[in-house]
Amino acid sequence: MQALWKDRGAGNNALLVVECDGPLAPSRVGRALDRLLDVCPWPAARLRRPFPWGRLHWAAGPRGALVAPPVDHRSVASAEDLHEELEAELNGSIDPRRDPPLRVLLLDCLSLPARSFMVLTWFHPLMDPRGAQNLLMHLARLDGDDGGASRGGAPPAFVAPPDPRPLRERGRLARRSLAYMRSLTPVPPVSPGTGLAGPGRARFRQESLVEPAPGAARPRAPREICTRLAVVGKAMAELWKKRGLPDAPFFVPIAVDLRPKGEPGPTFGNVLAFHFARFKPSETVDVPALSRTLREQMADAVRDGQIEANAVAMEFLQYRPVWAMLRELPGTARGETFSFNCADVLDFPAATGSFFGCRIRNAYHLPAVLPRPGIGVFFNRCASKTNIVTSWIEGAVSEDEVARIVDVVREGLGWTPSA
């Protein structure tokens, strides 16, 4: 979908920002990256398609020709400067045909002397957020064991094994997914970015909050995505009403992690399927009822095999040129994709001992969104902190509108600011 906006310079970056309690040494991070290339070439690969209908894939040369992505190191004076550096990373597009698909930035903030930040920026098709977490854990182990993990023993499963099912069976599932997608959006969705002629820069806002403990008054902790999506939907419905947008169904993709539960799973590749939630702005008046409806939608999609079919269809998309995809679904040729984005990346594994000689204080994910929809709300947790990241495009929404959305979400979930 990013190709719809290539003439506007819209990026497809994702960031993982890790806050540490001491300085990070660029030499240690660079050494760990170089050791990783001994067993895994993908951080130095380039995106290739041999011919128009060829498979889009990551290609890497022999080990001797691989060059690890550079590790940049800068200092900033204040938290405001830190924020500007992160937005610059968000907007600094990666050309995966010519550039390494990821880059590493270490930031020291002079107004926060006991803290430093590692910023991992990657071209989103390289891996999903869980994969980025896995990558950082691999690098931390390679730093901690003096490189032994890269030279002895079996390396981790960096990529998922190929689907063992025959082509005919997978093709049937992919066609089923396409028919399903066509049935979901007979009318193109409306978003804050609809009609936006000149999208601006990618922006973000991040807040660390504390969740209340579940109890008798809160028998179901609001950690599941259906509850959080219902609350985010309420905030968006307020924006829709303010703008006079129609009460047409929201259309929101919900990522489903395909990794085995309790295991780190593959690092590279988007190891995801998608469920597509649908609900009207008017339905957000009763958040608990809407949460139940969204939960039932997802259960139906699992039972009917739609999420599995969507996962198979994503594999087939590697063989489809952009122009062929644009004619498949209503609205995509005009740039309309979803009403807004929403995701919960769950827990960052903060209890990992030493992280390049430091302790992790917090970590959060920061993805760019497309000009349409123009806004997304993302959750993750690190230790006792829950992070809300709102990512938007200038022109689609204003800072005041973003602030109001965050207020509605925070109040709706009963969260309080973190110390």
Image: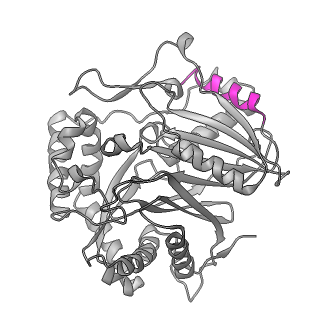
Would you place residue 308 above or below residue 51 in this image?
below
Colouring rule applied to residues: one colour
User: Which residue is at 29% across, 77% downward?
Assistant: 280
Range covered by the magenta-colored residues: 25-40
Question: What is the x, y in percent for residue 271?
Answer: 41, 44
Q: Is residue 396 visible?
A: yes
Left/right placement of residue 404 relative to residue 97 reads: right
Question: What is the x, y in percent for residue 218?
Answer: 55, 84
Q: Quadrant of the C terminus?
A: bottom right
Q: Is residue 145 visible?
A: no
User: Which residue is at 29% across, 39% downward?
Assistant: 315
Would you place residue 322 above or below residue 290 in this image?
above
61, 272: nearer the viewer: 61
Would you place residue 152 above or below residue 383 in this image?
above
Question: What is the x, y in percent for residue 17?
Answer: 63, 49
User: Which residue is at 26% across, 63% downward?
Assistant: 301
114, 72: nearer the viewer: 72
Is 30 part of what is drawn in magenta?
yes
Question: Looking at the magenta stretch, what is its main secondary structure?
Answer: helix
Report the number of numbered marks. Answer: 0
